[in-house]
Amino acid sequence: MLVTGGAGFIGANFVRHTLAHHPGYSVTVVDKLTYAGNRANLAGLPEDKVSFVEGDICDAPLMDQLVRDSDLVVHFAAESHNDNSLDDPWPFVNTNIVGTYTILEAVRRHDVRLHHVSTDEVFGDLALDDPHRFTETTAYAPSSPYSATKAGSDHLVRAWIRSFGIKATVSNCSNNYGPYQHIEKFIPRQITNILSGLTPKLYGTGEQVRDWIHVDDHNTAVHLILDKGRLGETYIIGADNDHVNNKQVIELICELMGQDGYEHVADRPGHDLRYAMDSTKLREELGWAPQYTDNDTGMREGLSQTIEWYRDNEDWWRTAKDGVEKQYAKRGQ
Ligand code: NAD
Ligand code: TDX
């Protein structure tokens, strides 16, 4: 199995999950080790099961060779942070679109199965009082340079399926949280703020809704799609948390960490209001169900574990913290 972006947040959790629950696979990770990739995310994994190649998915000769030597490609590599895409869209266009194109051409040449990992953000956003959820047939309407380039990558995969008959599946998942997530992202930023004695920062009013899912639940869904998904199909992945807004999430983090307050900071320009995923197809066709579904927010257990992970792994995030906060301070956030 070739895993692109396997030194990033979801990819590294996916590689760990694969070794723990699907021991038949041997894995090659290809990762450019951008600011978001970290070799330490794969530390401790057996070398006879996981090999690492530092490389760029836009490098066509490299991808040709890696894909030729694989039975299966799981494609996570991307520029993934909306706020960064507002400062400089080019790396998003390059990696998310040109990189995916490069992989598609390699799997087409070598007739290798591909799973493309994508996001709910390709569908744009819903009004706060809109009861609808995104499904596999919802029209694309991305808002940010990040989501527009992910939408572009999905369209390329769908076109390569239809025009060239490549063996591929696509999944669109909602917001993930869990260990190894870069501290630029909402949940780990607040946890590490509190651990650093800084005030947690909520954009605008915090009324925005993200359909949070634990990264392990995302990855069990990807494995089910690899095992039982129908080629050519798209599957929506979501854990039915579309009733929890950012304000409730930050308040839950504060409660779990014994923190007194948080501050409102400048809102994100063009901030998407609400995402909500309808994962009926995945649940009914493939029998998937999330494990992290407890009580009011569905996040209490997963968040508690995640907080513990950041508490126990300060070495992993400490050196990046100042730089990330300086970047946010420049934006008034
Ligand atoms: P991440 O930013 O933590 O990791 C991305 C990884 O890709 C990093 O290791 C980085 O070094 C690598 N990478 C970037 N450009 C590369 C290139 N040109 N060549 C090779 N490697 C490169 O992102 P993540 O949160 O783990 O997201 C992984 C995938 O899941 C992305 O495709 C993202 O769109 C999708 N996704 C993320 C979420 C979420 O909530 N984080 C939700 C749904 C879908
Ligand atoms: O400090 C913050 N305060 C805050 O209120 C940060 C960093 C974010 N926010 C808000 C913005 C969003 O409404 O929290 C919400 C989540 O923000 P992010 O963690 O930046 O995630 P989001 O923009 O929703 O996108 C994420 O989910 C979909 C991932 O980063 C994407 O890669 C994925 O496709």
Image (cartoon, helix red, strand yellow):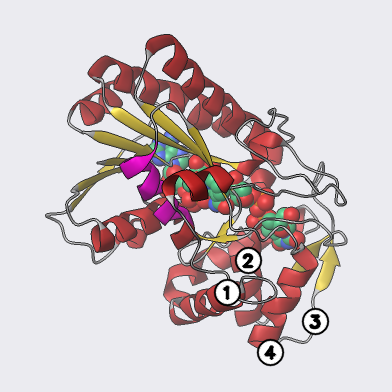
Residue wearing tag 1: 303
Residue wearing tag 3: 261
Q: Which callout, 1 or 3, points to the residue nearer the camera?
A: 1
Label 3 SS: loop
Does the magenta portion include 228? yes
- Whether residue 90 appears in this view of the structure is no
Mark 2 C-beta closer than 8 Å to ligand 2: yes
Q: CA distance from mark 4 to mark 1?
A: 14 Å
Determine which quarter of the picture holds residue 180.
bottom left
| 4 and 3 marks in contact (CB < 8 Å) | no
Q: Which callout, 4 or 1, points to the residue nearer the camera?
A: 1
Identity of the residue drawn at 60% across and 81% down? 195
Residue wearing tag 2: 187
Task: Mark 2: give few (<14), some (14-19) or many (20+) Cα within 10 Å.
Answer: many
- Report the side of 11 relative to 151 (left or right): left
Image spot of residue 51 (x, y percent)? 20, 48
Q: Which residues are magenta?
A: 218-229
- Report the side of 251 relative to 229 (left or right): right
| 2 and 3 marks in contact (CB < 8 Å) | no
71 vs 263: above or below: above
User: Which numbered dot is residue 258?
Assistant: 4
Identity of the residue drawn at 65% across and 30% down? 148
Label 2 SS: helix
